[in-house]
Each structure stands twice: as C-alpha cells, then as structure tokens.
Image: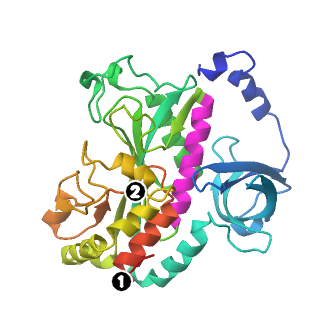
Amino acid sequence: MSVLSERPGFNKAARQHYLSLAKGSVCLVTYIWIDITGEYLQCKTKILDTEPSGVKDIPEWDASWLRDGRVNEVLLVPVRMFRDPFNLDPNKLVLCEVLDSNCVPTETNQRSQCAKVMEQVRQFHPWFGLEQEYRLFGLDGQLFGWPPQESSATQGYCSEPTNRMYGRDICTSHCNACLYAGVKICGTNPEGKPSLWEFQVGPCEGIEIGDHLWVARYILQRVCEDFGVVATLDPKPIATARGTSGCHANFSTEEMRSEGGLQHIEEAIRRLSKRHSQHLRVYDPHGGKDNQRRLTSQRCTSSFFDFSAATAQRNVSVRIPGHVSRKGRGYLEDRRPAANCDPYAVIRALAETCLLGITGED
C-alpha cells in the first residue's frame, strides 16, 4: 500500500473500480506540455469519440499560460503519441508543442528550433542517449528513506542492501510504465546515495530523444504520485547533502560509430572545448546557475569553469568510455547537462557545435 493510500481521503484501491467501468468506444487523450518555466510539465485530458491511429488524428487544443500575473491563451499542438500506462489501452498520452496566440512558438518551446537544427544535420544520423538522474523526497519534504545523519556507510553505486535501497518499487514501476507507453527506456540503476536513482533513454535519432525523455519524466511524476513520494530533478536540492543529479548526454554520428570513428569523436571534443561556457548556459533552465552549484570538481563532477576531457574517467566535462577507446569507434558522453535540463536545448547545442561548426557566441 502506498503512503498516499494510507492517508484519509486517498484510497488508491477504490480507484480500480472506476478504471474497470466500461467506457464504450471513447478514448481518453492526456495532453502533456512544458510550462512557462521550461522546467515543469502540465497536462489535461480530452475525450475523443474514437481511438486515434496517429498523432495527426489528435486535434489541437487551447490552454492557459500565466505570464507576469496575467493569464494568456496558448495553442497545444500534438507532436508525439504514446500509450497511456495509467488509463491503459486504448487511451493515449500525447506530447505537445506550445504556440502563442499568433501561432509562434513560445519562449520555452525549445523543440521547435531544435527540430530545424536536427533537419540540418540529418545526413550525419545523430544518435542520442540521455541518463536521467533524480532524487526522491517524502511528502514531509525530507529525503526519502535517508537516516537522520548522512553516513558514508550508506553509500554505494548499484548496491543491494536494504539500508541503501530506498524507492526500488518506484524505479521498477516507472520502467514498466515507460515500456508499456512505448518510451525508449533502456535501463535503470540506483545511484551513489540512498533515494538517488537513474534511468536511461535511447538511443534515439534526432528530435525523438527529447520527446521520449519528457514523456518519461511525466510518467515518473505520475508513478511517484501513486506511491506518495516526490521526484525532483533539482541538481542539488539540499546544499549540505552529498551527491548531485545530472542528465549525461551520449552522442554519436554515423562516422563516429563506424570503423576509425575515434578520430571523429576526438574532433567533436575539440570543438566542444571551444564552447564550454556557451554549452553551460543552456545545460540547465536557469542559464548555468544550477550547474554552478553542481559542477564543483567533486564526487564525479567536473569544473564549472574549465573544460576537461579524458578516457574512462568520470570527473571530466566530456568522457570517452573505455570500451569506445578500445574499439576505436562509438560515442562520447557529455557529463555537464544538469538533471533539470531541457533535452532539446542539449542536443541542439551538441549538433550546432559538433556538426555545424558553430564557434561564436550564442
């Protein structure tokens, strides 16, 4: 039984009765969109007469947009459809872009510009994989499961003792829900402190990675709602606590994945070294402020101020995995993006720097 179900007025078991009721041929479509902060998601549900066969069958819809104390109207434009792991088939989740009243992408609509860049680099067949770290909190605002005093004895990557694993059911449930939805989740693992977890999405080509990661984040929040906990993507929600949360970005092109690809990986890293500050400005939604708290050169993080790269090391800006170096081909890992990054901004920056050769200021 979840924590939430034990509280008066929140009986999750009762919900099953209503989910089992016959609903005829209608389809519940949950619209998901990135809000004005560029960091959080909103949603609402429309009932369609029939199950859509694709995203083009789902109509656009209006929504409210709070800006400077005023409520404005925006347009939700469906861009990618998934199965709904909460209401089950035939119901859908649909990720939407947000346009203003003049049908212009809003300021936090990073997807629109990213899609244009991905079209420009299409011939490179860029693949991306994102490693999303997150941290669990209880409804009391305390780190979920942590002892009163943080201890090095509770540390251990991928460990199994009970005193190190808080939230495994959440991690497993989230993974299964993503698989049902059709999200390209490819792995999960506990991180270096209790209540710290990670899931990986990809590989995906181009814009698809951003769509799948945002929906995976939405599913994570919904799963946590059922368990009565909160998942945060804040890179360092408690200043005195050890450990940080990132969203490491794995990136390759067809040339990098082919025989002799290591030289193309090294050339991409050389280009990345020239635009360190520009990338950090877009690797968290607050213009680098979150990453400045996170990238301290401690605990497998690199320096915020200086670019670094190495093979088989994790305290660097960009890493060449050991197996990639041995094979002479594969991918690079950019370890700088914060956990709350916008994936569209991250992959756009990687493509512009590594593939389009942009070298100046953004």
- Image spot of residue 85 (x, y percent): 63, 43
Apparent side of residue 79 relative to residue 296 in the rendered image (left or right): right
- Image spot of residue 307 (x, y percent): 25, 63
Q: Secondary structure at mark 1?
A: loop
Apparent side of residue 225 relative to residue 201 in the rendered image (left or right): right
- Image spot of residue 134 (x, y percent): 45, 41
Q: Quadrant of the C terminus?
A: bottom left
Q: Which residue is mark 2?
A: 337
Q: Quadrant of the N terminus?
A: top right
Q: Residue at x 37, y 28 (%)?
A: 194
**Image height check: is 116 above or below 169?**
below
Q: Residue at x 48, y 59 (%)?
A: 287
Q: Which mark is residue 54?
A: none
Q: Residue at x 52, y 66 (%)?
A: 208
- The magenta segment: 208-226
Apparent side of residue 340 relative to residue 189 in the rendered image (left or right): right
- Image spot of residue 332 (x, y percent): 28, 65
Locate residue 22: give its quadrant: top right
Q: Label 2 is placed on what type of residue?
A: Pro
**Residue lying farthest to the front in this orientation:** 68
Residue 54 can be seen, yes or no = no
**Image height check: is 317 above or below 227?**
below
Q: Residues within 10 Å of mark 1 (few under 14, many from 20)?
A: few
Q: Which residue is mark 1?
A: 357
Q: Residues within 10 Å of mark 2 (few under 14, many from 20)?
A: many
Q: Label 1 is placed on what type of residue?
A: Gly
Q: CA distance from mark 2 to mark 1?
A: 20 Å
- Mark 1 or mark 2, which is nearer the start of the sequence? 2
Is residue 164 part of the magenta span, yes or no? no
